[in-house]
Image: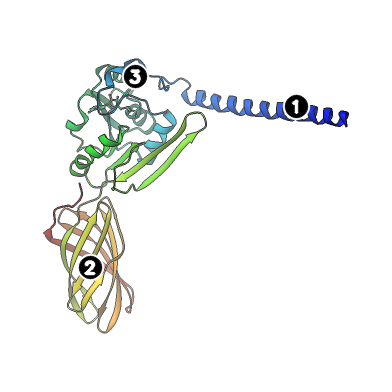
């Protein structure tokens, strides 16, 4: 009995040692991988930390986004060499510099913290991207963001919500907005990703595509079985979500399968023509008060596709900001 107890104890100790050794190995491998990711990089979690105090009273304090999260944000924003990226509250400049160095983009960052802006300029010189990047001491709420293809931010919840009307007003439809950690309220993100591991924790990142404004009334005429028909459409819009009812001489027809991604719009409806129900799939590009694209007829008719153009007859003030 005594010997059996001793054997169990020794066996248990062996198992715990193996387990502990295993855990230690995992930690070593993970920390090595973080070191490898940061190898040769100045963008450690502590970069610029000595200047953080000066950002304490700003709408968002200074904290650097971990580099794996920066990379995930740039991938999420589909950043490429033709893109112009603006980081609002750019800290040590890592997002703009990584966009230029790894993805060939151009861009600038703004920050109210002069020392961080100086540090960013120094890093940009050291990383060989001064020709494609710039950093300004500037209030992000007063910054002209209209030329951006991608806007990034890591602020605070309140600051994000304060920024939202500017984002929707100043950015072109199709501009990608990527935020680390904080969302934009009832503007549904187009994508959400969780990045993380046991060492640097979980980080949520969000993507929004700025939608074209399409609410209001639209009208068009298309060729249908039995003759031409005029459609009037009233569109309701909540950010990228749209709904509407089209009306013609035969009745009212609700839109379905609606999508709005930047300036690309598509919707379908089924309506009557020549005593048959005809499906119409519309696709187009919004250019202010005109949408141009194609319509495909199917259902009670041999499939046919032709050019389609509609003009807005009445604009409605957006209910959302
Ligand atoms: C959390 S840090 C993010 C830094 C960097 N974007 C990153 O992700 O590593 C937020 C930065 O925003 C800056 N900031 C806060 N309010 C600002 C404002 N109104 N205008 C410009 N910069 C601001 C702070 O100084 C700080 O450097």
Q: What is the crowding at mark 3: few (fewer than 14 residues within 10 Å), some, or many (at least 20)? A: some
Q: Give the x, y percent position of residue 5.
A: 83, 30
| Mark 3 vs mark 2, CA separation in Å | 54 Å
| 117 to 275, vertically: above or below | above
Task: State which tag comes first along the sequence, 3 or 2.
Answer: 3
Q: What is the crowding at mark 1: few (fewer than 14 residues within 10 Å), some, or many (at least 20)? A: few
Between circles 2 and 1, the one closer to the viewer is: 1
* Left or right, residue 181 beside residue 23: left
Residue 80 visible? The answer is no
- Ligand 1's image quarter is top left
Residue 281 found in image quarter? bottom left
Q: Nearer the viewer, residue 258 or 194?
A: 194
**Secondary structure of the residue carrying numbered label 1:** helix
Task: State which tag comes first along the sequence, 2 or 1.
Answer: 1
| Mark 2 vs mark 1, CA separation in Å | 72 Å
**Secondary structure of the residue carrying numbered label 2:** strand
| 76 to 15, vertically: above or below | below
Q: Nearer the viewer, residue 259 or 49?
A: 49
Per the rendering, the mark at residue 13 is 1
Q: Give the x, y percent position of residue 60.
A: 28, 28
Q: Give the x, y percent position of residue 306.
A: 26, 68
Seen as rendered, the residue at the extreme front is: 1
Which residue matches tag 2? 245
Residue at image position (48%, 21%) is 39
Q: Is mark 1 within 8 Å of ligand 1?
A: no
Q: Give the x, y percent position of residue 320.
A: 20, 50
Q: What is the crowding at mark 2: few (fewer than 14 residues within 10 Å), some, or many (at least 20)? A: some
Q: Nearer the viewer, residue 316 or 6?
A: 6
Seen as rendered, the residue at the extreme left is: 314
């Amino acid at each position: 009995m005594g010997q059996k107890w001793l054997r169990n104890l020794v066996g248990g100790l062996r198992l715990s040692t193996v387990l502990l050794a295993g855990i230690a190995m995992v930690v070593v491998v993970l920390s090595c991988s973080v070191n490898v990711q940061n190898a040769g990089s100045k963008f450690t979690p502590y970069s610029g930390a000595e200047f953080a105090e000066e950002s304490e009273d700003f709408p968002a304090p200074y904290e650097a986004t971990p580099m794996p999260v920066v990379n995930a944000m740039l991938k999420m924003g589909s950043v490429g060499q033709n893109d112009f990226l603006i980081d609002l509250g750019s800290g040590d400049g890592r997002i703009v510099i990584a966009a230029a160095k790894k993805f060939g983009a151009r861009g600038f960052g703004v920050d109210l913290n002069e020392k961080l802006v100086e540090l960013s300029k120094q890093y940009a010189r050291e990383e060989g991207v001064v020709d494609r990047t710039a950093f300004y001491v500037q209030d992000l709420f007063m910054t002209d963001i209209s030329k951006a293809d991608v806007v990034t931010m890591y602020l605070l919840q309140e600051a994000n919500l304060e920024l939202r009307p500017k984002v929707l007003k100043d950015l072109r439809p199709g501009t990608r907005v990527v935020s680390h950690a904080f969302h934009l309220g009832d503007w549904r993100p187009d994508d959400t990703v969780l990045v993380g591991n046991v060492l640097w924790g979980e980080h949520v990142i969000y993507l929004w595509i700025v939608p074209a404004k399409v609410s209001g009334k639209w009208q068009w005429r298309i060729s249908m079985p039995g003759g031409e028909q005029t459609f009037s459409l009233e569109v309701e819009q909540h950010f990228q979500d749209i709904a509407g009812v089209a009306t013609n001489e035969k009745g009212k027809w609700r839109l379905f399968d609606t999508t709005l991604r930047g300036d690309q719009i598509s919707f379908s409806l089924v309506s009557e023509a020549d005593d048959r129900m005809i499906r119409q799939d519309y696709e187009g590009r919004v250019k202010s008060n005109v949408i141009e694209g194609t319509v495909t007829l199917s259902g009670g008719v041999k499939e046919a596709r032709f050019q389609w153009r509609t003009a807005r007859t009445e604009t409605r003030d957006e209910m959302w900001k």
